[in-house]
Amino acid sequence: MIKRSMFDKGLCVFPSMIVKVLSRRTIAFPVYLLIFAGSIHATEQPKIIAGPYLQHVTKTSITIMWETDTPSLSMVRFGKSRFLPKGKNSAPLDQQVSSTETNTIHELVLNNLEPQTDYFYQVHSHNNGKQGVESKVLTFQTAVKDTSPFAYVVMGDNRTYPERFKKLAEKAFAERPNFVLNVGDVVSNGANKKEWITEYLAPASELMKRVPTYVAIGNHERNASWFYRYVSYPTPENYYSFDYGNAHFTIVDSNAKLVPGSKQRRWLEEDLASSSAKWKFVAHHHPPFSSDADDYGNTSVESSRRGDPRVQSLIPIYEKYNVDVVWCGHIHDYERTWPIRDGKVDQAKGVIYIQAGGGGAELENFAPTRSWFTAKVLRNWQYCLVTIHEGTFRMMAYDIDGRMYDFLELKK
Ligand SMILES: [Fe+2]
């Protein structure tokens, strides 16, 4: 970062002091002027308070975001990884994109990139090139070619306990995935702006500055405007789809309308019908199949629906379009189902549902009896790693201490 003088840092506290000082009405006029001048000077020196972090990545583009404490212009310098001429020892950043308007939450798209290629990047925020701040030089990789192997991590429900999420995010980054899919509830209250930094962006910063992340919006995000400001996905962002390698990912908003005839349900059908990808994955926050103890009926005294009825209505669509795995969360532990079709286990043609809600929030309990669909449960904080090459899918699920407790291989 560009170094700021102690004088600049000291002046940054003045705006919050002004109200207190003025209310006393005892301060001399020249001192007001000094404080006012100081507050203006302080706003000219933006400071990065979140990010940078990577969002939607394709074979030829990526979105980079960050936040500054004061409105400023945005610029990203970037360049392709390459061997340097002898004597040079800094990353080549020979291209740049910039905005013409000032923002606090910055979002720039880098286009015309090469597939499956490593790049260096550095974000800058400045006021007309005078006072500025810049990040370290960081890295990203564009999406792989359709025939190449790739890996992604799935985690979710990290809200409220940033220390646990930080530990899991570090483990996720240690896997060096191509991207991360978060099944939602990334913050306790999506309307509370500061939680987007304290609960989501800051604990996972080491991961998110180098690995693109996708979120399936949870109920705790509350469909708040901050969700749309802090993330960047294909429109309309609360539901969207993307391709990566030979796979198609469809992200559903399970808080929004899903009844027959609803806009999102029509979109979901069209999206799945139009994809010819080898692998099809769906993600949404709420689980169609879950052995939770009390969310779908209190299993100590009554029957349970063993899953969320609203998303259970989507099961025929998943079966019709041969979705391979549906990822979900909401319940704070892990559960994998057998392959399911027509309400029973069908190992040849079934859809597998994996609840990966052990991202940090308080753990929940399972019903005391095993569900007919359960293949594996784990009551612990956890994340999943998926690797794919051509017709081979492998999923390894790890607990917060790095122990692998589940493994799944699919071939087609
Ligand atoms: Fe939830």
Image (tube, grey):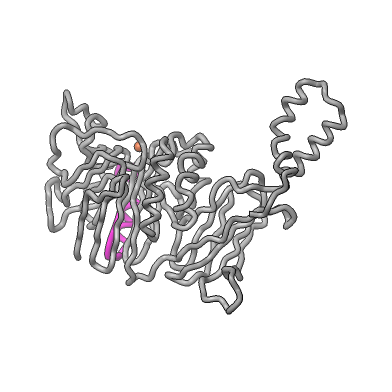
Placement of the N terminus among the 4 image quadrants? bottom right
Q: Is residue 26 left or right of residue 17?
A: right
Q: Is residue 230 left or right of residue 242?
A: right
At x 12% / y 47%, what residue is drawn?
A: 344
Query: Looking at the rendering, which quadrant does residue 39 occupy?
Result: top right
Q: Is residue 232 magenta?
A: no
> Could you say where residue 17 lies in the image, as x and y percent from the top left?
72, 30
Placement of the C terminus among the 4 image quadrants? bottom left
Q: Is residue 124 left or right of residue 212?
A: right
Q: Nearer the viewer, residue 357 or 318?
A: 357
At x 70% / y 49%, what residue is drawn?
A: 4
Q: Nearer the viewer, residue 1 or 285?
A: 1
Q: Is residue 160 left or right of residue 274?
A: right
Q: Is residue 27 above or below residue 45?
A: above
> Could you say where residue 289 lies in the image, as x and y percent from the top left?
22, 42
Residue 256 visible, this angle: no
Start and end of the magenta stretch? 256-281
At x 53% / y 65%, what residue is drawn?
A: 120
Q: Nearer the viewer, residue 262 or 333?
A: 333
Q: Is residue 260 magenta?
A: yes
> Could you say where residue 327 lies in the image, as x and y percent from the top left?
29, 49
Residue 85 visible, this angle: yes
Query: Which image quarter has ligand 1?
Result: top left
Q: Is residue 212 above or below residue 158?
A: below
> Could you say where residue 221 lies in the image, as x and y percent from the top left?
43, 38
Query: Looking at the rendering, which quadrant does residue 299 occupy?
Result: top left
